[in-house]
Image: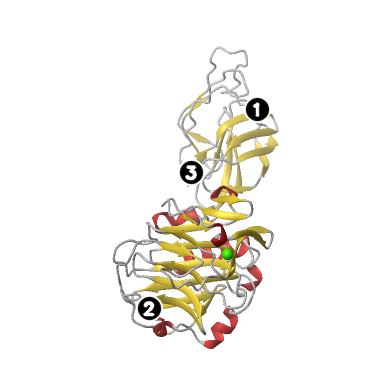
Amino acid sequence: MGIPPIQTPPQEGIGYLGFLPLQRGSVRWDGTTEGSTTGSTSGSTSGSTSGGTSDPAPTIDSVSPSSGLASGGTDITLTGTGFLDGASVTVGGSACTSVIVVSETEITCTTPSGSVGAVSVVVTNSDSQSATLNSGFTYTAPAWAPEDLGSSLALWLDADDASTLTLSGSNVTEWRDKSGGGKHVAQGSASQQPTTTTFNGRTSLSFDGTNDLLENATVGITSGSYSGSFNVFYVATRSGVAGTLLSERSGGVVAISQWANLWGPNYLSSDGTNLWSNHTISSTVFDQLSSSGGLVVHVHVSGSRDQLWLNGASRTVDSGTANSITGPAGFRIGARELSYGQNWHGKISEVMVTTSSLDSNTRQSIEGYLAHKWGLTGSLPADHPYKASAP
Ligand SMILES: [Ca+2]
């Protein structure tokens, strides 16, 4: 069996004097060559030794680092023997770029993009003799990031990103949305501004449970009459009765709120009447939600179905009927809409809302991302795919 033809583009003179190897043909596993091989010089003094048969075949001993992102761009160093000026390198069958033959025993280059997994590294000298190091390099998947959610990410507030906070002393006057949708929240009244604090070593916001709230009074997280998926992920702590984490007015109104012994996704009817009796959470879950520790919670609302995951574990939520409404635009962080108040008492560190149906892996990626970022992996279940390492 042959391997695909190795196509070596002319190398620009990086690190050596204008030597331009041109090579065509394919290399068999036994190192013999089909097709023609052409060595050339370009008037430099470095010359070429191609075409000779006196040079020994190259060998590859190691590749360092031995892994890198599948997107490419990893600078690698190959060590071995018999590397000749003009040698080309492939990783996973694609040309490594910016090849520099440092010496007969060292080549550096930059990996091309590839597919996740172990791939072969091949050095081909200008005389067509080659060396292959099977599984010499391993392409790894890129780290998951919220940006991977694309347009599904409807809101992303991250207290640990100082560039998104506008402060007046320790008061927060604005918390800017990182989703790209410009759904920033602000508070002009000093007495209602949350303050900066820390949670597990990162910057968080403290809400006083009395009147603190941040608001976008004109733009909702969703728009129009909305009854689709609405997934809220947040890292927060509570003190006593926590109050309301988030309320959304412009679409199918959602309040993530604790009131009496209720905590969960609550729809409001068009006249503002609370329908949350249809969305109660079992007392067992409530007891756990009562913990003052940090929480990674996911609430999934789609049509009449609610689901909740607490710290990556599924919790039962009674289903009820969801009403899609169109109300006044805007949303709040840390309080219910309109004059209901029920302000959050505790810390809010990060909030993400997505508005497309999420598969399990995406949900778990978000949970894992938040848990690792905020030091909450100890709360994830043992079988969570991102318990040990971040997505
Ligand atoms: Ca206050």
- Looking at this view, is 365 or 198 the one in front? 198
Q: Which mark is residue 55?
A: 1
Q: Is residue 78 above or below residue 167?
A: above
Give residue 279's position: percent from left, percent from top.
Answer: 42, 82
- In the picture provided, is 290 more to the left or to the right than 24? right
Amino acid type assigned to the residue bearing label 1 in the image: Asp
- Looking at this view, is 285 or 238 the one in front? 238
Q: Quadrant of residue 225?
A: bottom left
Q: CA distance from mark 3 to mark 1?
A: 23 Å
User: Disc 1 vs disc 2: which is toward the camera?
Assistant: 2
Question: Secondary structure beneath disc 1?
Answer: loop
Give residue 149's position: percent from left, percent from top.
Answer: 44, 57
Give residue 45's position: percent from left, percent from top.
Answer: 62, 13
Residue sitting at x 52%, y 40%: 112
Question: Secondary structure beneath disc 3?
Answer: loop
Q: Which mark is residue 3?
A: 3
User: Disc 2 vs disc 3: which is toward the camera?
Assistant: 2
**Disc 2: which residue:** 305
Amino acid type assigned to the residue bearing label 3 in the image: Ile
Amino acid type assigned to the residue bearing label 2 in the image: Arg
- Looking at this view, is 46 or 115 the one in front? 115
Q: Is residue 386 above or below residue 54?
A: below
Q: Residues within 10 Å of mark 1 (few under 14, many from 20)?
A: some
